[in-house]
Image: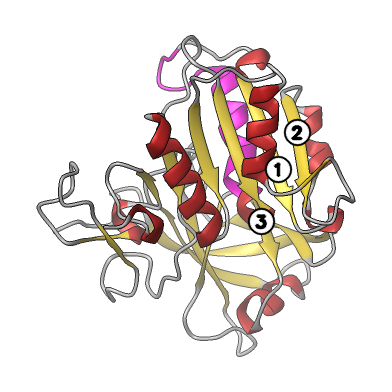
Amino acid sequence: MPAPPPDARSFRSAVVSVTPCGDDGVLLRIRPERELPPVRASRFFMLRREDALSPAIPRPFSIYRQHGHELEFLIKVMGKGTSALAHSVPGTHLRTIGPLGNGWPTLSGGGAPWVMLAGGVGSAPFYMAIEQALRGMDGARPAALSELHFLFGAARSGLLYDVAAFERLGVRVHTATIDGSHGHKGNVLALLETLQRSGTLPERLRVLACGPERMLEAVASWCDARGLDCWLSLETLMGCGVGICNACPIPTRREGPRGAWPNVKCCVEGPVFKTDEIALHTLGH
């Protein structure tokens, strides 16, 4: 049976800073008691405060940035767990479990462009993905700035979290908002189609996506219809993060490479899956 990754540990961290970000988010920076080697983008950590303000069950968060010995997370404040983290002060102790999950594939240069689709806080796993692609990870050829396109969508401009930081990376950043307050008016998939019609993007792409479930279903269906390689980082609810509680099952495609089992565990076999591995609702499986 799938097991947690061998480098995952449970340890204590101290909050370094909490900085407001967008309309309802924060950037949480922590310093673990043990130094971690470089973490692959889209792996995640389970976080909770060690006092009574946090629920007993920790919450999963993709790593956003890694600054030497310190880790940073982009958190949308939604409930008791995220609120407790957002109201932490420097020195607050957190129980930290990770790094967990598998992360994005290696984003090598050459070939079709890499197009990254983010919906709201689904931008979190992409900052380090861009850094690692530009640097060249696992001996891969580094990607050129022109080979990376970051498409960031949200309901309104205040939910395009930290978009200026992505622009400073030097890649091509395109935005979309449902209310038209920033960039293209519409959703991020409509933005992608607009960029293709204008010739900014070609027909053949390699696609990565993270965001709300309905967005991921639409992206998966769109890529499937065009025969495009596509990887999704799922925002599935999790209980333990290490494969014990069975709270995060994802249906598999029977004809796909994981079809021998009806479900996979998002926490230990994901959160990143290629679309030919899993069955999201709009694919009809």
Quarter of the image where the C terminus is located: bottom left
Disc 3 from disc 1: Cα separation: 10 Å
The mark nearer the N terminus, 3 or 2, is 3
Residue 189 figure quarter: top right
In the foreground, 138 or 94: 138
Above or below 246: residue 5: above
Q: Is residue 113 visible?
A: yes
Q: Is residue 127 magenta?
A: yes
The mark nearer the N terminus, 3 or 1, is 3
Amino acid of disc 1: Phe
Image x and y of residue 252, in percent:
23, 55
Colour style of the rendered protein structure? secondary structure
Amino acid of disc 3: Val
Badge 1 vs badge 2, beta-carbon distance below 8 Å:
yes
Left or right: 205 as drawn, with respect to 285: right
Q: Characterize the local packing of mark 2: few (<14), some (14-19) or many (20 or more) Cα atoms within 10 angstroms.
A: many
Label 3: element kind: helix
Quarter of the image where the N terminus is located: bottom left
Q: Which residue is mark 3?
A: 121
Image x and y of residue 139, in percent:
41, 15
Left or right: 259 as drawn, with respect to 167: left
Q: Which residue is mark 2?
A: 174
Q: Which residue is mark 1?
A: 152
Left or right: 221 as drawn, with respect to 201: left
Above or below 19: residue 47: below
